[in-house]
Image (tube, helix red, strand yellow):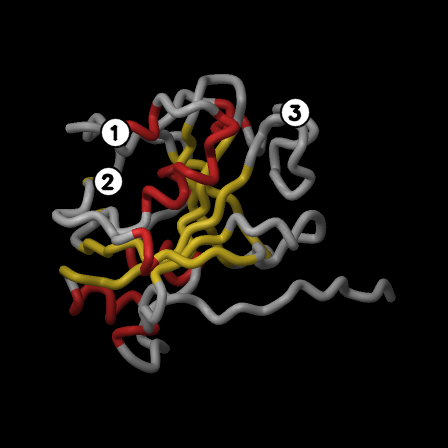
Amino acid sequence: MNYPWLTAPAEAVADTARDLLGWLVSAHGVTARLTEVEAYSGLGQDPASHAHRGPTARNAAMFGPAGRLYLYRIYGMHSCVNVVCGPEGQASAVLLRAAEVIDGLATARARRPAARSDHDLAAGPAKLVQVLGLDASAYGTSVVDGSGPMTMTPPPVPVAPELIEAGPRVGVTSAHEVPWRFWIKGDPTVSAYRRHVRRARR
């Protein structure tokens, strides 16, 4: 199977993110079509990246090799998943923000009983992780060799360029204005945009 984004240069992470729209992600009996993604560079020029200050125990998976998963917790209760891309050691990654569940609907509904509709099942990064049934054990696993819980396959038909929109990133305290969030225009599963507001210290 062809994974051109595995060898793309780190500075091309935004193009890689755009190209991943429409790809299929599968794990634990559920398959979903990516409708929204977000790019993060690890070249030291992206203060929003978890790898901006270099490798740590938490972000080690971001430094490669490409095709591995980087999971992290937010607010101490939800998880988000990124796919590492680019040359090893340069830490570029794409956050999988939202998707349309196309197979395993019953399983996805059971994992997300609070979803208001099928369109809401994976309409956000934490929701997507939930419907795929991913947990901390997926950290650092491969999506390309079949050894990990999640696999990725290209779409039968690529998303047309005119259907791809770009805008500011979500939920980051720095460089949120960088237009590295990409989504499929008009798709009902795309997450609602909320500009980050810095919380006041108590």
Q: Amino acid at mark 3?
A: Gly
Residue wearing tag 3: 54
User: How far is mark 2 from mark 1, CA to CA?
Assistant: 9 Å
Percent of width and height locating residue 169: 57, 55
Q: Amino acid at mark 2?
A: Met
Q: How many marks?
A: 3
Q: Does 55 sit left or right of 122 as displayed?
A: right
Quadrant for residue 186, please give it.
Answer: bottom left
Percent of width and height locating residue 150: 26, 41
Q: Does 48 sit left or right of 8 as displayed?
A: right
- Front residue of 10/137: it is 10
**In the depicted structure, whether residue 147 falls above or below residue 70:** above
Percent of width and height locating residue 53: 70, 29
Which residue in the rendered view is the most extreme toward the front? Answer: 162
Residue wearing tag 1: 3
**In the depicted structure, whether residue 185 falls above or below residue 5:** below
What secondary structure is marked by label 3?
A: loop
- Front residue of 67/181: it is 181
Of labels 2 and 3, earlier in sequence is: 3
Residue wearing tag 2: 152
User: How far is mark 2 from mark 3, CA to CA?
Assistant: 27 Å
Task: Give the residue displayed 36% in from the left and 77% down from the top.
Answer: 114
Of labels 2 and 1, earlier in sequence is: 1
